Image: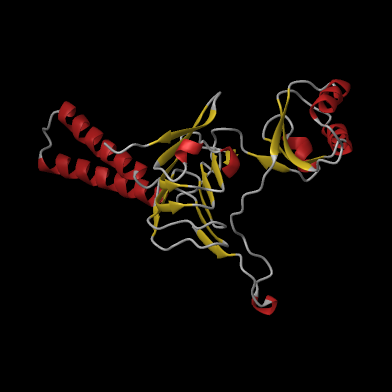
Amino acid sequence: MTISDTGQHDMTSQPAITFYGKMLTFSRLQLSTDDLPAIEAHLSDMLSNKTSQIPVIIDSSVEQDLSALIELLWSWGLQPIGVVTGLLDTQARAQRLAIFPADGKRIERIVSSKKSVTQLSQTSAEKTADAQVQEDNSVDDTVKNKDNSTADISAETLLSSEHITSMIYDQLLRSGQSINHVGGDLILTNSVNSGAEAITDNSLHVYGRAQGRLVAGATGDKDARIFCQVFNPSLVSVAGTYCLRDNLPENTIDKPVQVRFVEGEGLVFTVMEST
């Protein structure tokens, strides 16, 4: 979890480097051909000028001459900042471009308690089995197998409970502040002011007034959702697909709303009427 304040402070007290979540607007350029003249022809149809300065991520289903492709894109005013992981990874690394995870895949997280939980569970299972043998050496093999199976199930249940850790934040998220939680749902019991942002790689819940920038599924989780009691954000995003305030459905403003991603449809907004 990260909370940061982006306000102005005395530069002498600032650390040299600070990490914090910040939404940036860029577009994904999907390519199904390596024919550069064909790509340029499509660009000429799509772009009215060569000064758009649009940051783009390259998502190609075929091998490309990445260096030549980047030169072409820059000549049309586009600014390649990275690639979607796949065929272009090696070339992207060589050119120091960012490599983004593919849709639906989360950045791998190492759960520090996973190993200890597994070892503890295995030890408990072994002790249970040893005690059972010492208590009655004539116990039927079927019964012992059943006991061990029960211990294994308990271990798996305990292990799975360690994978997701939700976070509850009770303070008002003020303009210029950013909260970024990785590893589970982010639950805000207060409001998100305009100019603030709330980001999580799982689902986002806002029980106050939801303004500012709301981001769920930040690392590509298409099952993530956003739930708001009073919905009025400047930007909303699920699994990398975003919508700005001017494009939100009018019937959702200031209503209790659920936002989810649906393949082929994009963001779907549902007003949650009380019964």
Task: Name the quarter where the C terminus is drawn.
Answer: top left
Q: In which quadrant of the rendered view does residue 41 lie?
A: top right
Residue 38 vs residue 88, the one in the foreground: 38
For this view, does 212 lie left or right of residue 94? left
Q: Is residue 150 above or below residue 126?
A: above
Residue at image point 49% right, 57% down: 1
- Residue 23: x and y, percent? 62, 49
For this view, does 221 lie left or right of residue 100? left
Residue at image point 40% right, 36% down: 271
Q: Is residue 248 above or below residue 265?
A: below
- Residue 269: x and y, percent? 47, 34
Residue 178 vs residue 127, the one in the foreground: 178
Q: In which quadrant of the rendered view does residue 157 lie?
A: top left
For this view, does 38 lie left or right of residue 28? right
Residue at image point 30% right, 39% down: 274
Q: Is residue 72 in view from this perspective? A: yes
For this view, does 106 lie left or right of residue 122? right
Q: Is residue 142 above or below residue 240?
A: above
- Residue 18: x and y, percent? 63, 64
- Residue 13: x and y, percent? 64, 78
Residue 221 vs residue 27, the one in the foreground: 27
